[in-house]
Amino acid sequence: MAWSIIAAVALGLAVLWIALIIALRLVAPDEMRVKDAMRLLPDLVRLTNRLARDRDLPRGIRIRLALLLGYLALPIDLVPDFIPVVGYADDAVVVAVVLRSVIRKAGSGTIERHWPGTTEGLAAVYRLTRTTPDPA
């Protein structure tokens, strides 16, 4: 009886993990966006940290960003790096999804105010997150 429950839980976790890999692959940015994200990673981490500390942003956004920083700091990935295509891209996908959500909630002006890098880097962030700056 106990083994069947353990087996069912393990099978359920495996199915969820496979579904996660498929979902990540479906929302993954193309290869150029992943390369942009890897090149911009130091600026993206600084941006995330600055946004997470901004008391003017709603608490939900700050919590989401703090969780993202925690995820990036962990040595364990959702998808191990040895899995082709998605293995190295999972961090970029997670960053892109969270930042897209933040840009939609907080507006691009907030992102621009906190952006530590170049204007070309900021343009790459918009490409990575598939968003556009707010009209002036």
Image: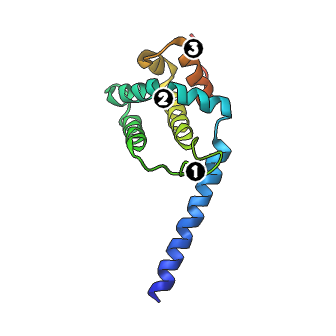
Residue wearing tag 1: 82
Q: From the top left corner, tell me how far across and down residue 38 is, in percent.
A: 54, 30
Q: From the top left corner, tell me how far across and down residue 47 is, in percent.
A: 42, 25
Q: Amino acid at mark 3?
A: Glu
Crowding near the residue tagged with mark 3, few <14, some 14–19, many ≥20 C-alpha atoms within 10 Å: few
Above-or-below relation of 102 to 135: below
- Residue pictured at 39% horizontal, 46% vertical: 74
**Mark 2 to mark 3: distance in Å?**
14 Å
Above-or-below relation of 49 to 75: above
Q: Earlier in the sequence, mark 1 or mark 2?
A: 2
Q: In which quadrant of the rendered image does the C terminus lie?
A: top right
Q: From the top left corner, tell me how far across and down residue 3 is, in percent.
A: 47, 85
Crowding near the residue tagged with mark 1, few <14, some 14–19, many ≥20 C-alpha atoms within 10 Å: few
In this view, the mark in front (3 or 1): 1
Q: Amino acid at mark 1?
A: Phe
- Residue pictured at 44% horizontal, 50% vertical: 76
Q: Earlier in the sequence, mark 2 or mark 3?
A: 2
Q: For residue 41, which numbered disc appears in the image?
A: 2
Q: Amino acid at mark 2?
A: Leu
**Mark 1 to mark 2: distance in Å?**
20 Å
